[in-house]
Amino acid sequence: MLEKIKEATAYIKNIIVETPVAGVVLGSGLGNFGQQIKVEKEIPYGDIPHFPVSTVEGHSGKLLFGELGGKKIVAMSGRFHYYEGYHPHDVVFPIRVMKYLGIKTLFLSNAAGGTNPAFKVGDLMLIKDHISFFTPNPLIGKNEKELGTRFPDMTEPYSKALINKAKEIAAAANIDIKEGVYISVTGPTFETKAEYKLIHILGADAVGMSTVQENIVAVHMGLPVFAVSVITDLGLREDDNVITHEEVLEAAHAAEPKLTHIFKEMIAAL
Ligand code: HPA
């Protein structure tokens, strides 16, 4: 696995000019964020050795290299989800490559269902902790010591310092933000009413189909993570309220400017 990471990294280093200081993963409906980046190089996933190949047509995905908030960054336009059929090792492969490229901070975003009754559609939730029990741990398998320890500590999976910085930035811009626990599920079904209720009882404020496996390998490698959920639908809701992918994308899209502002200012402050 290490060899694959190093080959992919070497391929990319040959193309890019400067080392990115931060990596950004864009969640569902949050792709316009890419337009904020002064893109210098684009590398399609399909060109990078050992990168997972997208199975969905028109969903090719690429790494964007460029400048945001005066800093060099790399952004993943398109991520790999477990529900698409990828092995967890493939889901997290790009995160490991970004670390080997030299990033010092990882920014993750996602669309999520709210299971905290105080949340509204369009809210931003800073992820302060997660529950990973419903999705396979990406560290299962032989441990590569060069990446990290066999039994990583998970007391601060999301950097408190970065969360505090985000709160300052949000307050200064009058952006209302929530904070909470994210639980990962495999999908691709949205949850049943009973499942949303269970998730709420388990202590999670939001539920989604990404982010946690990426976070775990970042923590394993000692990479500080900042993550935000855009609440795109409410799990604890009226009986006849059906959730659709379109509604999720629309809500994510509407909340995108707030998320973009926070990410941009945080990267500028790195
Ligand atoms: N559940 C799981 N994943 C999601 C949801 C949800 O309600 N909304 C957006 N992604």
Image (cartoon, rainbow, N blue to C red):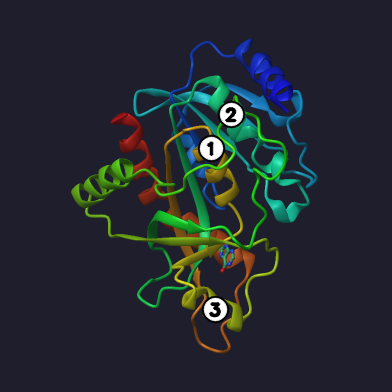
Mark 2 or 3: the one toward you: 2
In the rendering, which numbered label is found on residue 198? 3
Q: Give, as a three-letter code, the residue at label 1.
A: His
Q: Give, as a three-letter code, the residue at label 2.
A: Leu
What is the quadrant of residue 185 in the picture?
Answer: bottom right
- Which circle's residue, 2 or 1, is located before the other in the chain? 2
Q: Is residue 194 above or below residue 86?
A: below
Is residue 133 shown left or right of residue 120?
Answer: right
Task: Report if the CB atoms under discs 2 and 3 are less than 8 Å apart.
Answer: no
Task: Work out how far the residue at label 1 is from the one at label 3, CA to CA, in angstroms.
Answer: 29 Å
Please count the marks in the image: 3
Q: Secondary structure at mark 1?
A: helix
Task: Work out how far the residue at label 2 is from the one at label 3, CA to CA, in angstroms.
Answer: 35 Å
Q: Is residue 16 above or below residue 233?
A: above
Q: Secondary structure at mark 2?
A: loop
Question: In which quadrant is the C terminus drawn?
Answer: top left
Is residue 203 shown left or right of residue 118?
Answer: right
For the residue carrying disc 3, how many other residues have a C-alpha within 10 Å: few (<14), some (14-19), or many (20+)? few
Q: Nearer the viewer, residue 233 or 166?
A: 166
In the rendering, which numbered label is found on residue 147? 2
Ligand 1, by image quadrant, is: bottom right
Task: Work out how far the residue at label 2 is from the one at label 1, CA to CA, in angstroms.
Answer: 7 Å
